[in-house]
C-alpha cells in the first residue's frame, strides 16, 4: 500500500486500486490527501536527483582543479618571462584580479583569472605581508674599473627598473667578466619550495647564476647547480628552511662598448619571489613593490594568488670589488668607491 512516510518508495507492483478507495470516497478532501502524498513522493525523487547532481558537480570541480594544476605546470615549463609582468596597479578591490597574459594587464573583476587567449580559470587570492632586507654587491674582472652605477635616485631601491630596464651597470676599461651579488635576508626562517628570479634580457652576453641559502646565517648550501641566466624559476623538490639567500650572477662578456667610457656590464633583475606550499613571500625589489604593491604568484597548489607587500624600509649596501674577495663601499651620491 501507499505509505504515509516518504522514507522509502513503494514499488509500483505493490500499489493496488483498493488501497485508494477509502480516500476517494471522501471527495475533494480525501483527494487532497492523496495529492499531498503523491507530492511527497515526487519531492523525494527530486531530492535524490539533487543529491546525485551535487556528487556530480563535486567530482567535476575536482577534475577542473586537476586540469588547472596541470595547465599551470605545463605553462611554467614554457618561456614564462612574460607571464609574470602583470603587476603594478593599485587595486580598489582585492577579492579577485583579472590577469590577461597577452596584454599584461591586471584588472579587478568578478573572480575570473584569464591565462592566455583560450584558458579562463577562477582562483582565490591571499594577502600576506612580508618583511625582509636586501643588499647588493658588484664586481668586474678588471682592476682598472672606474665606477659602478645604480639606476634610480632612491638609495633603498637599488633594484629599481628605469626607462632602460636595467638595475645597474659596471663599467670597465678592459673587457672581462663581471659579477654581482644580491643578498636577501628574511625576517625569520621560512620554508621555501620555489624561487623566482625575474629578469628582462635585452642584448649582449649571457651568463650564469648560482643561488645559495642558509637557515642559521652560518652554514650555506646551494640550490641545485649553477644555471643559465635565462632561467628564472627554481623549483625545490623538498622544501627547505631559509633565513637568508644569496644570488651570485656572472656575466661572461660585456653587453656594450662605448669608446669614451669603456665596456658596460648590465644587470637587469626586477624582483625576487619566494614561494612555499601555503604562503607566497614576494620580495619586490623595485620602487612600487617596496612601498605598497602586488605580485602575482606563478604557482601555489594550482592557485594564482595576490600578495600584499608592505615593507616600509629596506637595508641595502653598495660594494665594489676588483678581485671578488675585498669589497669597497660605494658612495650613494657619487656612485664611486669611497
Image (cartoon, rainbow, N blue to C red):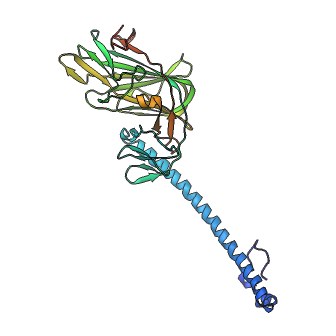
Residue at 48 percent across and 41 percent down: it is 299
Most extreme residue toward the left is: 259
Could you say where residue 300 lies in the image, as x and y percent from the top left? Answer: 51, 41
All told, the count of numbered labels is 0
Residue 169 visible from this viewpoint = yes
- In this orientation, which residue lies closer to the viewer: 36 or 81? 36
Residue 141 visible from this viewpoint = no
Q: Is residue 40 left or right of residue 159?
A: right
Could you say where residue 156 lies in the image, as x and y percent from the top left? Answer: 43, 21
- In this orientation, which residue lies closer to the viewer: 125 or 188? 125
Could you say where residue 180 lies in the image, as x and y percent from the top left? Answer: 37, 20
Could you say where residue 37 lies in the image, as x and y percent from the top left? Answer: 75, 79
Most extreme residue toward the front is: 92
Vertical comparison of 309 with 174: above or below: below
Residue at 23 percent across and 24 percent down: it is 256
In the picture, the quarter occupied by the C terminus is top left
Vertical comparison of 171 with 117: above or below: above
Residue at 33 percent across and 33 percent down: it is 200
- In this orientation, which residue lies closer to the viewer: 208 or 36? 36
Displayed quadrant of residue 175? top left
In the picture, the quarter occupied by the N terminus is bottom right
Q: Is residue 322 left or right of residue 29?
A: left
Displayed quadrant of residue 289? top left
Q: Is residue 329 left or right of residue 170?
A: right
Amino acid at each position: 500500500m501507499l505509505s504515509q512516510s516518504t522514507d522509502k518508495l513503494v514499488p509500483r507492483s505493490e500499489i493496488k486500486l483498493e488501497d485508494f478507495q477509502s480516500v476517494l470516497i471522501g471527495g475533494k478532501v480525501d483527494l487532497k490527501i492523496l495529492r499531498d502524498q503523491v507530492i511527497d513522493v515526487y519531492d523525494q525523487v527530486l531530492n535524490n536527483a539533487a543529491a546525485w547532481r551535487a556528487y556530480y558537480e563535486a567530482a567535476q570541480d575536482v577534475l577542473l582543479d586537476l586540469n588547472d594544476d596541470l595547465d599551470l605546470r605545463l605553462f611554467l615549463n614554457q618561456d614564462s618571462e612574460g607571464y609574470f609582468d602583470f603587476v603594478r596597479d593599485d587595486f580598489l578591490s582585492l577579492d579577485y584580479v583579472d590577469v590577461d597574459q597577452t596584454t599584461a594587464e591586471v584588472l579587478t573583476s568578478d573572480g575570473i583569472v584569464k591565462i592566455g587567449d583560450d584558458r579562463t580559470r577562477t582562483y582565490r587570492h591571499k594577502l600576506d605581508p612580508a618583511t625582509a632586507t636586501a643588499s647588493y654587491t658588484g664586481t668586474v674582472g678588471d682592476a682598472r674599473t672606474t665606477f659602478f652605477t645604480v639606476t634610480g635616485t632612491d638609495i633603498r631601491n637599488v633594484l629599481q627598473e628605469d626607462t632602460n630596464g636595467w638595475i645597474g651597470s659596471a663599467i670597465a676599461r678592459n673587457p672581462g667578466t663581471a659579477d654581482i651579488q644580491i643578498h636577501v635576508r628574511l625576517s625569520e626562517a621560512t620554508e621555501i619550495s620555489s624561487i623566482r628570479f625575474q629578469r628582462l634580457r635585452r642584448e649582449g652576453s649571457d651568463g650564469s647564476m648560482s643561488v645559495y641559502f642558509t637557515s642559521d646565517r652560518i652554514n650555506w648550501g646551494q640550490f641545485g647547480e649553477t644555471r643559465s641566466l635565462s632561467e628564472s624559476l627554481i623549483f625545490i623538490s623538498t622544501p627547505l628552511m631559509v633565513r637568508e639567500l644569496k644570488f651570485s650572477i656572472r656575466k661572461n662578456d660585456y653587453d656594450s662598448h662605448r669608446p669614451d667610457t669603456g665596456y658596460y656590464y648590465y644587470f637587469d633583475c626586477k624582483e625576487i619571489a619566494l614561494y612555499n606550499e601555503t604562503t607566497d613571500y614576494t620580495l619586490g625589489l623595485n620602487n612600487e613593490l617596496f612601498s605598497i604593491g602586488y605580485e602575482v604568484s606563478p604557482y601555489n597548489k594550482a592557485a594564482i594568488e595576490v600578495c600584499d607587500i608592505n615593507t616600509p624600509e629596506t637595508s641595502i649596501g653598495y660594494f665594489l670589488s676588483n678581485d671578488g674577495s675585498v669589497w669597497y663601499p660605494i658612495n650613494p651620491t657619487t656612485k664611486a668607491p669611497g
